[in-house]
């Protein structure tokens, strides 16, 4: 989580030169190259249904990254991550049958409402476009989970992630190249782009796979609920993004909703 949110902070520094589309393209290109070289996933044989699922998995991953960066250009990092969290949280709550989970849905909804640009006391004015992009990224995150679960039943997660990242790059990078041309690969930007690819994709996904093998699912999911706070702290430290107490409270509500849903749903299993 620290790695991926630090990478997001560095990615925001690329926006003045490349915009969200260019930054996303470079991140996906470099991350897919690193993961594909490591896993050598092209050596595997894939059935037609697996390939179709892989396309859905990679496309949702690419769109999730692009929409998140579009949100990040317009709203502080911590708020963008809190809003994006509503995607997987909503997916988890839809699968629930317990009345208690309505409390988590309510807390998440209140958190989102507090982030919306209606707070006069906010330190920063929040862009409604940014909110929309972050919620869109959350929907893509939910689709990414659904496709990932399906493909993970047949294929080792490392190979699925590597090829999924390749599909994401194919889906997004041509538009970045069309918009930025050769400037996309300007020598001064490449070290930053490589750092973003490692911190935001290659390293955290690899660490995540190790953690999933060593931690119970409930522990892993509950720990992941800390991500909005880590994102807000990264934004504060690296980007000087100050949030109002209302916005910090909104992030806290989303985190409580996420952790509560994880604990409740895990107890059902």
Image (cartoon, rainbow, N blue to C red):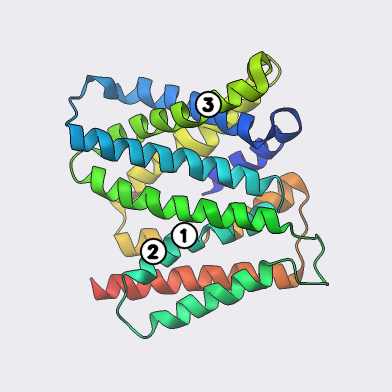
Q: Residue at x 66, y 37 (%)?
A: 10
Label number found at residue 165: none
Q: Residue at x 59, y 54 (%)?
A: 134
Label number found at residue 87: 1
Specify few, some or many for label 1: CA neighbours under 10 Å numbering under 14, 14-19, or 20 or more. many
Q: In the displayed structure, would residue 9 be above or below residue 180?
A: below
For this view, does 224 lie left or right of residue 54?
right
Residue 232 figure quarter: bottom right
Q: How much space separates mark 2 and mark 3, taking CA atoms?
A: 28 Å
The first of marks 2 and 3 along the sequence is 2
Q: In the displayed structure, would residue 126 be above or below residue 155?
A: below
Return the residue at label 2. 91
Q: Residue furthest bottom?
A: 99
At which x and y percent is residue 42?
27, 21
The first of marks 3 and 1 along the sequence is 1
Label number found at residue 173: 3
At which x and y percent is residue 118?
75, 71
At which x and y percent is residue 263?
36, 72
Describe the element under mark 1 as helix, strand or loop.
helix
Describe the element under mark 3 as helix, strand or loop.
helix
Asked if disc 1 and disc 2 are in contact, CB closer than 8 Å, the reply is: yes
Frontmost residue, 229 versus 105 = 105
Q: In the displayed structure, would residue 95 be above or below residue 129?
A: below
Q: How much space separates mark 1 and mark 2, taking CA atoms?
A: 6 Å
Q: How much space separates mark 3 and mark 1, taking CA atoms?
A: 24 Å
For this view, does 215 lie left or right of residue 60?
left
Specify few, some or many for label 3: CA neighbours under 10 Å numbering under 14, 14-19, or 20 or more. many
At which x and y percent is residue 47?
16, 31
Q: Quick check: can you spot residue 233? A: no
């Amino acid at each position: 989580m620290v790695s991926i949110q630090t990478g997001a902070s560095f990615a925001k520094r690329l926006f003045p030169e490349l915009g969200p589309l260019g930054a996303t393209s470079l991140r996906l290109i470099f991350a897919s190259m690193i993961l594909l070289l490591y896993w050598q996933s092209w050596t595997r044989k894939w059935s037609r249904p697996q390939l179709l699922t892989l396309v859905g998995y990679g496309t949702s991953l690419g769109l999730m990254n692009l929409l998140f960066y579009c949100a990040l250009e317009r709203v502080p990092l911590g708020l963008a991550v809190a809003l994006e969290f509503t995607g997987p949280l909503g997916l988890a709550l839809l699968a629930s049958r317990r009345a208690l989970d309505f409390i988590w849905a309510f807390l998440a909804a209140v958190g989102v409402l507090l982030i919306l640009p209606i707070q006069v006391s906010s330190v920063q004015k929040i862009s409604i476009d940014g909110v929309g992009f972050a919620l869109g990224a959350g929907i893509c995150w939910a689709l990414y989970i659904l496709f990932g679960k399906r493909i993970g039943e047949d294929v080792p997660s490392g190979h699925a992630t590597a090829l999924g990242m390749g599909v994401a790059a194919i889906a997004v990078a041509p538009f970045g190249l069309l918009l930025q041309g050769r400037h996309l690969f300007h020598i001064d930007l490449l070290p930053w782009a490589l750092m973003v690819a490692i911190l935001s994709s290659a390293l955290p996904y690899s660490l995540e796979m190790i953690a999933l093998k060593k931690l119970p699912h409930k522990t892993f999911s509950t720990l992941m609920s800390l991500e909005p706070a880590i994102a807000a702290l990264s934004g504060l430290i690296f980007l000087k993004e100050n949030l109002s107490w209302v916005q910090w409270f909104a992030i806290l509500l989303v985190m409580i909703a996420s952790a509560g849903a994880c604990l409740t749903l895990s107890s059902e299993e």
